[in-house]
Amino acid sequence: MKLPIKIMRGGFLAAVAAFTLAGAAVAEYPERPVTLIVPWGAGGGTDATGRIIGNLLQEELGQPVNVVNRTGGSGVVGHSAIATAEPDGYTIGVVTVEIGMMHWAGLTDLTWEDYTPIALYNSDASGVNVRADSEWNTLEDVFDAVAANPGAHKGSGAGQGSIWHLALAGMLSGQGLAPNSVPWVPSKGGAPALQELVAGGVDIVTSSVVEASGLISAGRVKTLGVMSSQRLAAFPDVPTLVEANGPDWQMSAWRGIAGPAGLPDDVATKLSSAMEKVYNSVEFIDAMNDRGFGLNYLPSAKFSEWMQQSDAAMGVVMNAVGLAK
Amino acid sequence: MVDPFFVALELVFQPYVLLVIVCAGAFGLLVGSIPGLTATMATALLVPVTFFMDPIPAIAAIVTTVATAIFAGDIPGALLRIPGTPASAAYCDEAFAMTRKGQASKALGVGLVCSVIGGLLGSAVLMGATSTLADFAFKFSSFEYFWLACLGLSCAVIVSTGSVIKGFASLLIGLFISTIGIDLMSGHPRFTFGSIELLGGVSFIPAMIGMFAISEILRFVATADHVRPQIPHQRVTSVFEGVGRVMSKYRWNLLRGSSLGALIGVLPGAGADIAAWVAYAVSKRTSKEKEKFGDGHAEGLVDASAANNAGLSGAWVPALVFGIPGDSVTAIAIGVLYMKGMNPGPMIFLENPQILNSVFIIFFVANLVLLPLGYLAIRLSTQMLKIPARMLMPAILLFCLVGSFAITNSVYGVIVMLVMGVLAFAMEENGFPIAPTILGIVLGGMLEEMFLSSMIKSDGNFFEFFSRPIAASLGVLTIAVWVYPIMTSLKGNIASRNRL
């Protein structure tokens, strides 16, 4: 059995070499590697941003930061793993907008109160995407068509009761239309929904504008509006909903770093100041801009308020559109 | 102006890039040949390293790692019956049967050469028809995917050996397992009994390792020493001996498998997995020696492993042209491309033609490098069979445990593996094939999702499934595949009755 052991040792060494790039300036905390849990799959947006932060955070902390994907259950599995970890600062994770949604949907009892907030680092507003050859050229065209023929046009973007589903339902109800006048076709995420859109399977896709950027530049998809208070820097031609004579409705997906509730103060302070440095580093800003991720920073106290507000707002919308249990 | 192709050649053929390719190839072989560690995991491990590289070596590292890791997944499959990827599960039993006949080197040699040729043909397709194929891929909506999933599942029953009824039952078990977890359509948890881990469904890789490897270990323990089938002494031959004859005999299979792989591989989300199963089933259906399938016959291996590696480059088509990832590996690769300031999309053809050409060339080089590296890996790994089984089995169990743990990063993966292992043991002891269960787990979620979203889109009108040209053709093909065996058996019955 000599060979496979050697093989394993080789793989292990390669993994260690990959993660041990920082120097070893040992302080009181951390004195051993930190695990960063990502509640979504490898290759997605949360994973990509989590890995960027993991790399930069290990330079700040002087210890390896291992990014671990704990996927499944619409984010419940990974979020639970962060909340139930030992509150010693050696297990932290990326917390996403879904933490304020899952408990309304009856999937878990977890809320923002089960975490020690460290920092918010990203938010991406939803766009309203249609096929490039669609006869709709403005948001008003879309609303008129939906009002004239409720139920005939289908929408997609992610799963049932997901953030992008809420984005569409909330926009319709803000416009005075029934939230289900555009029936939702659940999909695994933004990419398969856009595939459906281009293939002619659905008519409207609400998802982050970034996800559609490849298809926008290919001339296959056009974005009629973005659900934010200001236009996006990366897409200056896309109007906000209000500018496009739509409802005053904003919806974005956000991501932040948090640990389990009850993190010791010195650990939380250390992590917060490390995250602040990471967020302001040229490497982080470049990496986020390159992929088109929206930059949005809030320190721990403000992040806590943000999660609380987001949670309450989600509750209102999910009850209004009948997605809460 | 210099042709971007020659610029690309210059970019790739530099000592540093070539060194990266060789190292990445060796890394891919190491990770891929450890049971339970996957090509996706190898790629994810590479990401932090590629951070510090220029675009060309970064892409070279990823492409080479994936190509070699996918082939390396066949090694534990053939020697120990532990398939590395869902795709290699299609022909795992066939290769293992060859090992039992003392032909481990031949099985792996055929697999290696077919992988290389399939990979090269796939790369040629990628190079020649990227935009055409991308357009083709974007004609697929949920209706087309539904029929494709049906075709894939029908293949499971065709592929399985023995009773058709038992194969079908096995498929239904797999479909049932795929319903566990959160239902995507309604957001309801199903069969989870309040367990958080089960919300995420039954993890596929641990289930596959359990069904193949753990059941094999259980069978070893359960049989008495003197009736235990011994893996015969492997004939010490060169890896490539006899491979040439197989290749020339099945050259059309090779071409057919590669084409199927390249075609099905470009469809985002379906990819190489379905391709290998379909290729294997087509091979069995059209073979002149159907009865030899499942008993260590090289023909199906040729089709399936060629399709597997050809599909690999296909997955890059939608990724490069539209930024839509075909599988988890290309999703990671897209991330790396963005980091290097090369945003995927049609503009990549205009803005960075030399980089795009480099990607194509790297695919060729990576597949060529696979040949000598794979040869070495086969030579080394077949030594393993000289170890007495009573020492090998505990070590296999250990690797299975480590591998399943690594997939989910929790004990949950280990539990899934053990439960599925016991289930598979019980099934095989009673003559139920396990391959259909595996495919049921892989495709069950997709089948249900595509059916339900199609029904939502069509407001419940089933005829919409035939309203689009590609969907209608796939639908008719699928129904023909279902009806044909019934017709022939009916005809047989009538004929035999007439004789009476």
Image: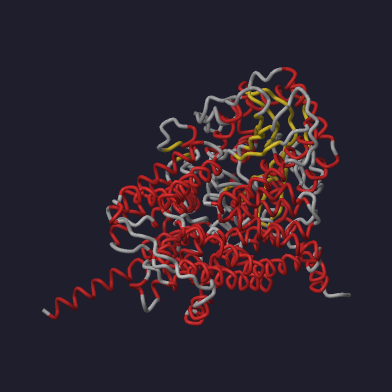
Q: Residue at x 67, y 67 (%)?
A: B369
Count of numbered marks: 0
Residue A46: horizontal and vertical position, in percent? 67, 41
Q: Is residue A45 left or right of residue A156?
A: right
Above-or-below relation of B16 to A202: below
Res. B483 visible in picture? yes
Residue A55: horizontal and vertical position, in percent? 75, 40
Residue A309: horizontal and vertical position, in percent? 68, 24
- Looking at the rendering, which quadrant does residue A166 occupy? top right
Residue B285: horizontal and vertical position, in percent? 38, 72
Q: Residue furthest left?
A: B500
* Colouring style: secondary structure
Res. B273 visible in picture? no
Q: Residue at x 66, y 30 (%)?
A: A92
Front position in the image: A129 or B248:
B248
- Looking at the rendering, which quadrant does residue A102 occupy? top right
Above-or-below relation of B478 to B40: below
Above-or-below relation of A22 to B337: above
Front position in the image: B50 or B370:
B370
- Looking at the rendering, which quadrant does residue B361 occupy? bottom right
